[in-house]
Amino acid sequence: MPRYARVVSDGKSFLGRVTEDGIRPVQGTFETGVCDADGVLLPWGSFRFLPPVVPTKIVCVGRNYRAHAEELGNEMPTEPLLFLKPPSALIGHEGAIAYPHHQSDLVHHEGELAVIIGRRARHLQEADVPAHILGYSLANDVTARDLQRKDGVFTRGKGFDTFAPLGPWVDTDFEPKHQRVTVSVNDGIRQDAPLSAMVFGVRELVAFISRIMTLEPGDVVLTGTPKGVGPLVPGDSVVVDIEGLGTLSNTVVSGGR
Ligand code: ZN
């Protein structure tokens, strides 16, 4: 299962293949293709994870699990409900989520499957979608729920710096089926559902989005969160896990002003 991560070590950033012993740097980019380099292995512990891609946009889907829409008292949409998170919100695996406590009193976790686009996608049919997907990653669509409710639009509540943890890697072999997505906070399970509970599946979502906006290589689609969203506070450790794909861990720190 090829997995690729972007990491920083000694002040330099690398794209590398994930191996048992660490990260093996590769040459090239996701856009032009990668090939194994003779680069020196970066052993575990010698690097920090960056978000695995540098997207032009992060397209998110709201209310894509029925039980989650119900827990917030929302109607199910008849078409995918889209919003954007800014790329400035991205952090990597083990990065810190900064709680904007002068502005919000209710910050929620939302664990989600992330689709990573590999080829420019415009006006796709569902059958064309797989050829445009590079792979999959894990995300946390961190949300200031009080601001989302107050504003009606999602830009502020979902857009703070650090509100888009993504990683640790892109897995280019993963196929979403019935794998479970779980979120735990300080070891207590909060969210747990199979990916098959999504109302709109990955092909449907990517085709739908591509008929609205061109998706570029590296762009990210967040596929919605299952039931069980709940509050985070500074000091928490939040872990998103998807069977067969990996584990994304982040801490929450006080975010100052
Ligand atoms: Zn979400």
Image (cartoon, helix red, strand yellow):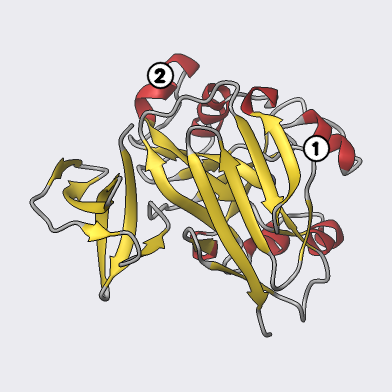
Q: Residue at the far top: name it.
A: 127
Determine whether the residue tagged by mark 2 lies in a helix, strand or loop. Answer: helix
Disc on res. 68: 1
Q: Position of residue 45 (x, y in %)?
A: 35, 65
Determine whether the residue tagged by mark 1 lies in a helix, strand or loop. Answer: helix
Q: Residue at x 50, y 53 (%)?
A: 166
Q: Residue at x 25, y 51 (%)?
A: 16
Q: Nearer the viewer, mark 2 or mark 1?
A: 1
- Work out whether residue 177 or residue 62 is closer to the camera in this orientation and state it: 177
Q: CA distance from mark 2 to mark 1?
A: 29 Å
Q: Residue at the far left: name it.
A: 38
Q: Position of residue 146 (x, y in %)?
A: 84, 63
Q: Which residue is mark 2?
A: 128
Q: Is mark 2 within 8 Å of ligand 1?
A: no
Q: Residue at x 40, y 61 (%)?
A: 50
Residue 121 shown left or right of residue 228 in the figure: left
**Discs 2, 1 touching: Cβ within 8 Å:** no
- Work out whether residue 131 or residue 26 is closer to the camera in this orientation and state it: 26
Residue 12 shown left or right of residue 196 in the figure: left
Image quarter (top left, top right, bottom left or bottom right) of the N terminus = top left
- Type of amino acid under label 2: Asp
Image quarter (top left, top right, bottom left or bottom right) of the C terminus = bottom right
Quarter residue 205 falls in:
top right
- Work out whether residue 23 or residue 107 is closer to the camera in this orientation and state it: 23
Lower sequence index among marks 2 and 1: 1
Mark 1 neighbour class, 10 Å CA radius: few under 14, some 14 to 19, many 20 or more:
many
Q: Position of residue 56 (x, y in %)?
A: 42, 53
Q: Is mark 1 within 8 Å of ligand 1?
A: no
- Type of amino acid under label 1: His
Residue 168 visible to the viewer: yes
